[in-house]
Image: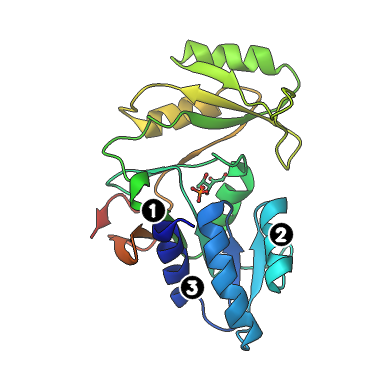
């Protein structure tokens, strides 16, 4: 059990109120959030979840959390998700679990996006964690070549059996080492200019609240503005 992840995941449940539609992120920190949320649902909390991965859907089922699809008219009141790196401006690298596209859609459309993580995920500059980029399988080696031309060492993510990892959307993930990122926004724009790139793991100006677990304690960082134009964090 990872106490810091558990503390952050459980704290996030305080923000969920009856009647809400809740975006459910992916990963081990989210697992602790779902576990506690499931207990509250059993005690009468009336919410619906929008899942970002098959693993999260399975956990939601296990904990008795009702799910709904992201269809026309569904508004996500709050989304809660983990991160692989978080910088002092609450910018994130995500996608270590390979769920970045659905996580980004759900986090982007949510009225409030809460990030949960153990303190080891805080960094001064993004980029030690290779950036996950989801790519269409068709012509993927050529797409990867264009990403290399932007300055990355790229590596096609593989499963234990050596076969390429396939995302829930049927795509490949390339882990792209650009070194420490001087300008994540420019990089994100450049990557989106490469045909074949579906989405990147750079989640910029998206997080409204970041909950960091430190042992059994939590620290909450709030972005200055509570909308998607947010640029920096207050502790
Ligand atoms: O982005 C993710 C999955 O695509 C996860 O949120 C991220 O990898 C953090 O995972 P964990 O909570 O297990 O440390």
Name the residue carrying label 3: 13
**Outermost residue, bottom side:** 44
* Observer-nearest of 56 and 87: 56
Q: Which residue is located at x 41 percent, y 63 percent?
A: 8
Residue 57's disc is: 2
- The 10 Å Cα crowd at callout 1, few under 14, some 14 to 19, many 20 or more, is many
Q: Determine whether 54 is above or below 161 in the image.
A: below
Discs 3, 2 touching: Cβ within 8 Å: no
Q: Which residue is located at x 29 percent, y 35 percent?
A: 125
Q: Quadrant of residue 210?
A: bottom left
Say what secondary structure mark 1 lies in. Answer: strand
Say what secondary structure mark 3 lies in. Answer: helix
Q: Is mark 1 within 8 Å of ligand 1?
A: yes
Q: Is residue 128 left or right of residue 224?
A: right
- The 10 Å Cα crowd at callout 2, few under 14, some 14 to 19, many 20 or more, is many
Q: Earlier in the sequence, mark 3 or mark 2?
A: 3
**Outermost residue, left side:** 235
Q: Which residue is located at x 63 percent, y 83 percent?
A: 46
Say what secondary structure mark 2 lies in. Answer: helix
Q: Is residue 140 left or right of residue 103?
A: right
Q: Of discs 3 and 1, which sits in the foreground?
A: 1
The answer to whether any part of residue 194 appears in the image is yes
The percent coordinates of residue 170 (x first, y second) are 76, 36
Q: Earlier in the sequence, mark 1 or mark 2?
A: 2
The answer to whether any part of residue 65 appears in the image is no
Q: Quadrant of residue 35?
A: bottom right
Name the residue carrying label 1: 118
* Observer-nearest of 6 and 235: 6
């Amino acid at each position: 059990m990872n106490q810091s992840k558990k503390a952050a995941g459980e704290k996030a449940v305080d923000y969920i109120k009856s009647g809400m539609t809740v975006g459910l992120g992916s990963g081990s920190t989210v697992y602790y959030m779902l576990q506690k949320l499931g207990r509250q649902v059993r005690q009468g909390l009336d919410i619906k979840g929008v899942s970002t991965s098959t693993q999260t859907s399975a956990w939601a089922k296990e904990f008795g959390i009702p799910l709904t699809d992201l269809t026309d008219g569904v508004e996500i009141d709050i989304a809660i998700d983990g991160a692989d790196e978080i910088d002092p401006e609450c910018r994130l690298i995500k996608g270590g679990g390979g769920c970045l596209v659905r996580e980004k859609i759900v986090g982007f459309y949510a009225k409030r996006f809460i990030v949960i993580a153990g303190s080891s995920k805080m960094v001064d500059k993004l980029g030690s964690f290779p950036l996950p980029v989801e790519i269409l399988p068709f012509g993927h080696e050529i797409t990867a070549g264009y990403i290399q031309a932007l300055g990355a060492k790229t590596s096609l993510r593989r499963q234990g059996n050596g076969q390429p990892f396939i995302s829930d959307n049927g795509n490949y993930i390339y882990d792209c080492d650009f070194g420490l990122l001087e300008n994540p926004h420019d990089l994100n724009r450049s990557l989106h200019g490469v045909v074949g790139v579906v989405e990147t793991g750079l989640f910029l100006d998206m997080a409204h609240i970041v909950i960091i677990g430190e042992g059994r304690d939590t620290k909450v960082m709030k972005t200055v503005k509570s909308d998607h134009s947010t640029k920096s964090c207050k502790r």
